[in-house]
Image (tube, helix red, strand yellow):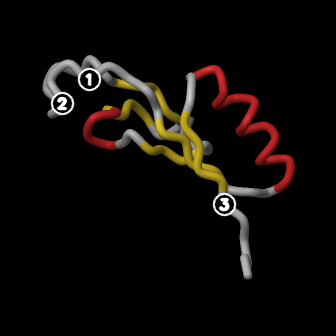
């Protein structure tokens, strides 16, 4: 049986805010896989840098999966 539900999702960036809203209202943690162009793939070019609640993160190195709380 499931003791604590968790949601894992991926899709367009516009989905993150509505999903975060629904899950936070219900107290359910969520993780989102970001779709991002990764020019170099090693974090050197900063082409995939994304602002999060804890500062800038590189999708290619720090992700692509982030908690919805960060996004």
Under circle 2, the secondary element is loop
Q: Marks 2 and 3, how far apart in space?
A: 28 Å
Q: Marks 3 and 1, how far apart in space?
A: 27 Å
Under circle 3, the secondary element is loop
Pointers 3 and 1 in contact (C-beta within 8 Å)? no
Near mark 3 (Cα within 10 A), the count class, few <14, some 14-19 or many ≥20, is few
Camera-nearest residue between 3 and 47? 3
Q: Marks 1 and 2, how far apart in space?
A: 5 Å
At 49% from the left and 33% from the top, the residue drawn is 52
The mark nearer the N terminus, 2 or 3, is 3
Please provide percent x and percent y for residue 23. Answer: 77, 47
The mark nearer the N terminus, 3 or 1, is 3
Q: Does residue 6 appear left or right of residue 53 in this picture?
A: right
Numbered mark located on residue 41 in the image = 2
At 57% from the left and 23% from the top, the residue drawn is 13
Under circle 1, the secondary element is loop
Near mark 1 (Cα within 10 A), the count class, few <14, some 14-19 or many ≥20, is some
Numbered mark located on residue 10 in the image = none
Please provide percent x and percent y for residue 10. Answer: 54, 37
Snapshot quadrant of residue 14: top right
Please provide percent x and percent y for residue 26. Answer: 85, 53
Pointers 1 and 2 in contact (C-beta within 8 Å)? yes
Numbered mark located on residue 38 in the image = 1
Q: Does residue 52 appear left or right of residue 36 in this picture?
A: right
Quadrant where the N terminus is found in the figure: bottom right
Q: Which residue is mark 3?
A: 6
């Amino acid at each position: 049986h499931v003791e604590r539900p968790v949601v894992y999702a991926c899709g367009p960036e516009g989905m993150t805010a509505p999903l975060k809203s629904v899950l936070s209202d219900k107290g359910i943690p969520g993780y989102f896989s970001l779709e991002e162009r990764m020019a170099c793939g090693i974090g050197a070019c900063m082409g995939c840098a994304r602002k999060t609640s804890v500062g800038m993160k590189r999708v290619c190195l720090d992700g692509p999966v982030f908690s919805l709380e960060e996004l």
